[in-house]
Amino acid sequence: MAKDLICGMDVDEKTALRSEYKGQTYYFCSPACKQTFDKNPAPWVSLGQTKGPIAPAAGQKPWPVLPADRPRVRMQRTKI
C-alpha cells in the first residue's frame, strides 16, 4: 500500500492513479488529488509522507474543490 500525499489516504499501488516526479512514482486515490499534485508537486514532495493529510502551503487549498467552495444551488419544490 502507498499513501496519497495530498489527502493521506492509503491506496493500492496496482489500481491507484499515479504520477512521476524526479524519478519517483507517487500514487493517488482520485483525479482531484492527482491534479493537485501535478499542478505543483514540489511542496507536496518536500513535506514528505506523514500520517494523515499533509497541510498545504499558506493560502493554498489542499483540494481543487471542497464542498464548501461549490456554488449553492437552490432546489425548487414542486407540488405533486
Image (cartoon, rainbow, N blue to C red):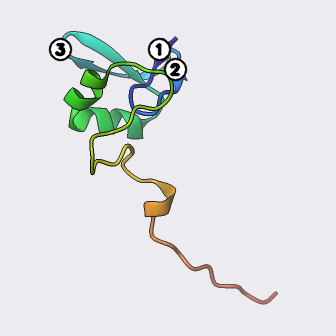
Q: Residues within 10 Å of mark 2 (few under 14, many from 20)?
A: some
Is 57 placed above or below 11 here?
below
CA gap between label 2 and label 1 equals 5 Å
Q: Amino acid at mark 2?
A: Val
Task: Verify CB contact (< 8 Å) between mark 3 and mark 1.
Answer: no
* Residue at point 38%, 37% (across, down): 55
Which disc is residue 22 wearing? 3
Task: Verify CB contact (< 8 Å) between mark 2 and mark 1.
Answer: yes
CA gap between label 3 and label 1 equals 18 Å
Task: Verify CB contact (< 8 Å) between mark 3 and mark 2.
Answer: no
Q: Amino acid at mark 3?
A: Lys
Task: Answer with mark 3 or mark 2, whichever residue precedes in sequence.
Answer: 2
Residue ranking furthest to the left: 22
Residue ranking furthest to the bottom: 79
Secondary structure category for the residue under label 3: loop
* Residue at point 70%, 85% (across, down): 77
Is 66 placed above or below 21 here?
below
